[in-house]
Image (tube, rainbow, N blue to C red):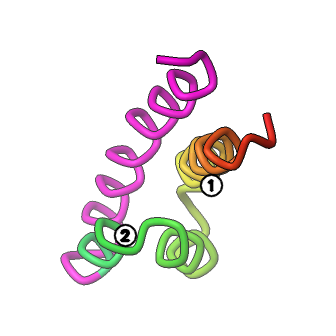
Amino acid sequence: MDIPNLIALVLLAVGLPWLVYLGFKRGGVIWGLLVLFFSLIAGLAFCLKKKTGWLPWLLVLAGSAIAFAHKSRLI
């Protein structure tokens, strides 16, 4: 496994469960399920609506960007 993939995996493994937890805890079942299935878009909407969860969303965004960039051979 390459280093960028490992970094992306760690960022996603930390950020996604944290964001889903916040979705269920602060937003209820609907927000939790939306964040679980549509993490980037629903996570951004959750952060804008509830004014919380920015750090885990940024971790998910960074992990996704690194994984995409490495898959596309940008890094």
Kindly identify which residue carries mark 2.
Answer: 35
Location of residue 52 (image quadrant): bottom right
Foreground residue among 53 and 67: 67
Q: Is residue 37 left or right of residue 53?
A: left
Question: Is label 2 in contact with label 1 (beta carbons under 8 Å)?
Answer: no
Asked whether 24 falls inside the magenta stretch, the response is: yes
Please tell me how many numbered marks the rendered image carries. Answer: 2
Q: Quadrant of residue 24?
A: bottom left
Q: Amino acid at mark 1?
A: Trp
Q: CA distance from mark 2 to mark 1?
A: 13 Å
User: What amino acid does circle 2 point to?
Assistant: Val
Q: Earlier in the sequence, mark 2 or mark 1?
A: 2
Residue 32, how many percent across, how many down?
A: 27, 70
Depicted 1 relative to depicted 31: above or below: above
* Residue at far front of view: 73
For disc 2, the neighbor class at 10 Å (few under 14, some 14 to 19, many from 20) is: many
> Which residue is labeled 1 in the image?
54
- Residue 25: x %, y % from top left: 27, 61
Observer-side mark, 2 or 1, equals 2
Numbered circle sitting on residue 71: none
Tell me the quadrant of the picture where the C terminus can be found. Answer: top right
Between 28 and 40, the residue placed more toward the observer is: 40
Q: Is residue 5 magenta?
A: yes
Question: Residue placed at 58% from the left, 50% from the top?
Answer: 64
Rendered location of residue 57, percent (x, y)? 57, 54
Q: Secondary structure at mark 2?
A: helix
The secondary structure type at the circle numbered 1 is: helix
Which residues are drawn in magenta?
A: 1-30
Would you identify the image quadrant in which residue 36 lies? Answer: bottom left
Q: In the displayed orientation, state which residue is furthest to the right.
A: 74
Residue 63 x/y as whole percent: 58, 42
